[in-house]
Image (spheres, rainbow, N blue to C red):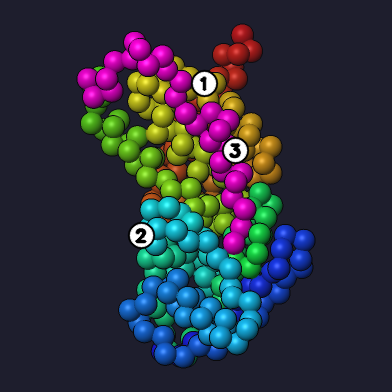
Amino acid sequence: MKLTLKIWRQKNTNDKGAFKTYDIDGVSPDMSFLEMIDVLNEQLIEKDEDPVHFDHDCREGICGMCSMYINGEPHGPLKGVTTCQLHMRSFSDGETITIEPWRAKAFPVVKDLAVDRSAFDRVIQAGGYVSVNTGGTPDANEIPIPKSVADEAFDAATCIGCGACVAACKNASAMLFVSAKISQLSMLPQGQVEKSERAEKMVAQMDAEGFGACTNTGACSAECPKGIDLKNIARMNREYLGSKMGSSN
C-alpha cells in the first residue's frame, strides 16, 4: 500500500504547530496503525529527521496510551478498538490519512501526537479509591452482590482512561471517564461508604482541570473503545446532587 500521511507536528506545548505531509510506500495491510508509524519513523531517522512522537505502551488495547485522532475520529474508523488495534487493511491504497493529537484544553500537546493526560490522574487522586481499615475488612468475595450489579460495575471498570471521550466531545468533557471511575467503586459495597464524598471531590477536580460540561450528545460513548455506557453519567449526577443536597441540610 502507498499512503499519504498528513501528520500534526508540534515541537512543544508553546509551539504553534502545523500539519506536515509524508508519503509512505510498502505498507502491509496486516500492519497495525502504530507499526505503520514505526516504519515512517525509521525512514525519517535514516534521513536525519525528527521522528513523529506518539504515546504507546502495551499495544494490546489495554493501557489507553495510543491516543490519536485519525481522519476526524478518535482511534480511527473502527468502533470498539484503540489505535494500536487498528490495522491498515481498514484503509485503501493511495488514501490520504490525517493524524492529529487529542484536542482539549486539559490535554496540552507535549510534542507532535503526544498529549499530557495527567489531568485524569489528578481526578483519580481526588477520590477514585477506597479507604478501609484492612484489619477488620471482610473479604470482598464473601459479600453477596447481585450479578447485574457486579456486571455493571465491571463494565464501568473497563474504562482504560485513553481520553477518546474527551476528544470526541464538542465541549471536551470528561464526564464519561469520571462517571465510569465513580460507578465502578460506588456500585460495590466497599465503595459505598465514601461514594458521596468521592463524587463531590472528583467532579470538583474535573472542573478545576478545565474540562468542559456535558450536553448529552453521546459522542463520548459512541467513540469509546470500551463502550462505556452513558448511564454512568446519570448515576454520577445523582450521586453528586444527592451529596450536595445532603451536605446543605
Secondary structure at badge 1 equals helix
Label 3 to label 1, Cα distance in Å?
A: 18 Å
Q: Is residue 182 left or right of residue 11?
A: left
Q: Which residue is mark 2?
A: 60
**Quarter location, residue 126:** top right
Q: Quadrant of the N terminus?
A: bottom left
Asked whether 122 falls inside the magenta stretch, the response is yes
Amino acid residing under circle 2? Glu
Q: Earlier in the sequence, mark 3 or mark 1?
A: 3
Q: Is residue 142 left or right of residue 131?
A: left
Secondary structure at badge 2 equals loop
Q: Position of residue 215 (x, y in %)?
A: 59, 46
Label 3 to label 2, Cα distance in Å?
A: 25 Å
Q: Is residue 229 above or below residue 81?
A: above
Q: Which residue is mark 3?
A: 122
**Quick check: can you spot residue 24?**
yes
Considering depth in this image, is 247 or 65 the residue closer to the camera? 65
In front: mark 1 or mark 2? 2
